[in-house]
Amino acid sequence: MNITKIRADFPSLEVGNGRKPVIYFDNACQTLRPRQVIEAVQRYYQEFPACSGRSMHRMATEVTREVDQAREKVAKFLNAGRKEEIIFTRNTTEGVNLIASALNWKAGDVILVSDKEHNSNLIPWQMVAKRHSAILRVVHTRADNTFDMEAFEQALKAGPVKLVAMGYTSNLDGVTIPAAEIVKRAHQQGALVFLDAAQTIPHQRVNVRALDVDFLAFSGHKMMGPSGTGVLYGKYRLLEQLEPFLVGGDTVSSSTYETCQFLPPPEKFEAGLQDYAGIIGLAAAVQYIQSIGFDTIEKQERLLNEFLSEGLEEIPGVRLIGPSDPRLRSGIVAFYIEGVDHHRIALMLDQMANIAVRSGQHCVHSWFNARGVAGSVRASVYVYNTLEEAKLFLDSLIKIRKVL
Amino acid sequence: MFCIIAFIVLSILGIFSASNRQLAKEALDCVLRRVTLRPCTTGFDEKMKAKILGYVITRSETGARFLNRYFEPLSWIFFFLLVGSTFFAARGVFLYYTTGSCNGLNQSGFCVFDPTGQNTQFSSVDESCPVTSGGDVVLTLEGVNLSGFPRLTGGANAKPIVFIGSYGCDYSRKAYPMIRRLVQRYGAELIFLYYPVKEHSDYLAKVGYCAYKLDPQRFWDLNDRLFAADKSRLEDEAFVQGVLEESGFNAQSVQFCAKDFQTEWVVKQQLAEVRKTNFYGTPTVFIQNEALIGPKPYRVYAIALEGLLYWLK
Ligand SMILES: Cc1ncc(COP(=O)(O)O)c(C=O)c1O
């Protein structure tokens, strides 16, 4: 598929706000949105801005149908067994918190995480450990940040692991873990597996049934969907057993003054009026990704990552985070220059050529703190980014390096 | 150091844009922390330095390298320049407020608050002479005999204001009503010296002299009317007669007096007396030994008469 044609779908790529058009390399934070998604959101507000499920009128029926279709689309996208396994959330973080609060914890239960989790997949488990006297164990990665299966195996066997909660693809370095194997081994030990797929779903095909994963969460805004949208997938059988998370309107079929009758999943977990426009927009994003195809996405990201990594390695003092092979790092290139402030680099890139990158610790403070690294600059590309943009980025960085 | 400069600059820019206002707030926070010997927490100085470097690097790499290396000393230099220019700007504002010109009393030269130089314009006494401005000519009332000129006496201890003006001069016309207002408001004494400029003859000087001689009370009404009248008709004797009548004068008596040889002689002497002040343009207003040339804003006259706190009096 033609990248120029894809770019034409993104109005924000043309916006320079009085400067050159943006070179958007902050896709791991949020991607840009194509017209198709923007229009889907707008369609809700213009045509049927009503409640889903509750009312009987035409507008409400329309919303109910659209939301239902959206759930169906997402289920198919993930190859879930049934659409009821799809719970709409506000983001990945909410999905993690839902599982953290809804699982039935016992003192001594072990939770396994990796050593480079996003705070969203770390802090909720820290809280579980604190509240329920559970044990949070960190499985360390290899020196190049890739997954260490042996260390994992050892950790699995070391204690009663209730849940393995891992970032499927790291937002720090773009490394994807061998999820199918992890799930298999975890299940053999009787553990459940939750995958934080925030950085996976936008970039590669994920088949939840083939993975046999128990829970998986991701965000709409990192896959061209509207801001503040997300999905939690869970095996239906497990979702049924979970305690509700947020409760109230739309989660129950009936109530007395003392008790209530919870609805089955997914309603049980979708309390109050939802972001219908967001859900409909999210379905449009799913459709848009499918229309481009993961082959195109992966090919373009690989091309860009190889080009960027090669260029970065030639700049004196640049240290790449993660494995040197760019094919293992999805669309992410994170680096730091010893003795140079990462924020300064990011600000200068922004000022010089309207290049948007992220700088700091990318919500993976634990990894940086453990290694005494102050932070990094992260360029994260997506399917609409081009080699010309990558070249401009490298040229600008070379200039910055000469000056700083 | 950089925070201070940034704070001042951004505060000014902040008047125009909200994003600069936010940055100014961050700069202030940074300044306050620095003053108490703590480091900036907002990363403001880092942020601004990076932005500036990012801007410079696209124009000159060498410049950016230099700036990066000497950022702190350069900040100091800018700081002193800023302090200096702030001082001059403040001085300019003060001078403009008190004298109507950023450069000082009766000084021409560009002033942002008065870009067209309205407050320093005047009608030259003799268009053919090169007009020398304030600096080298000392205007004075010393040795000038003011006894024969129209005088509007104020209260006890009234401060004298000497107004040299011409009915046909736009600038005098602008200043005159203000001076009248000032005299009334602060009970000052007004001495009026008519001096014809440009193409005007001495005719109106004689009319004024005679009118005052005949009826000092009515003279001021006539004076007000002549300053307000259609200036293209001031040389028209019939028109002037009409104005005289309106002020309650017997126009014929005034005309008769004006044509008198003695009047001509006295008026000539009076004009010679006016010239002794060394004035070179109208209006020239002497207030408290200060000569204000050109029409000033009302407050400038008031300050000259009553001081900076004139509005309290
Ligand atoms: C790996 C990973 N997990 C979780 C999150 C949190 O996503 P959200 O803020 O959308 O909840 C992010 C966001 O950057 C992420 O990259």
Image (cartoon, coloured by chain):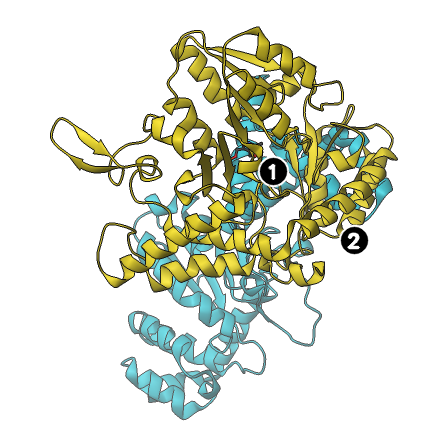
Q: Which residue corresponds to the image point at 63% horizontal and 26% vertical from the top-left? A: A181
Q: Where is residue B168 drawn, in percent x and y?
A: 49, 78
In the displayed orientation, state which residue is furthest to the bottom.
B238
Q: Residues within 10 Å of mark 2 (few under 14, many from 20)?
A: few
Circle 2 — which element? helix
Q: Are marks 2 and 1 in contact (CB under 8 Å)?
A: no
The chain whose colour is yellow is: A
Which class describes the residues within 10 Å of circle 1: few (<14), some (14-19), or many (20+)?
many
| Residue B254 locus on image (x, y percent) | 37, 83
Q: Colour of chain B?
A: cyan
* Corner quadrant of residue A87: top left
Residue B230 versus residue A315 in the image, above or below: below
Kind of residue sitting beneath label 2:
Glu
Which dot marks residue A261? none
Q: Amino acid at mark 1?
A: Thr
Q: Nearer the viewer, residue A199 or A61?
A: A61
Q: Measured along the vertical axis of the image, is residue B63 above or below residue A342?
A: below
Left or right: where A72 falls relative to A310: left
The residue most toward the front is: A188
- Does label 2 point to a residue whose CB lies under 8 Å from ligand 1? no
Question: Which residue is more in the foreground, A12 or A160?
Answer: A160
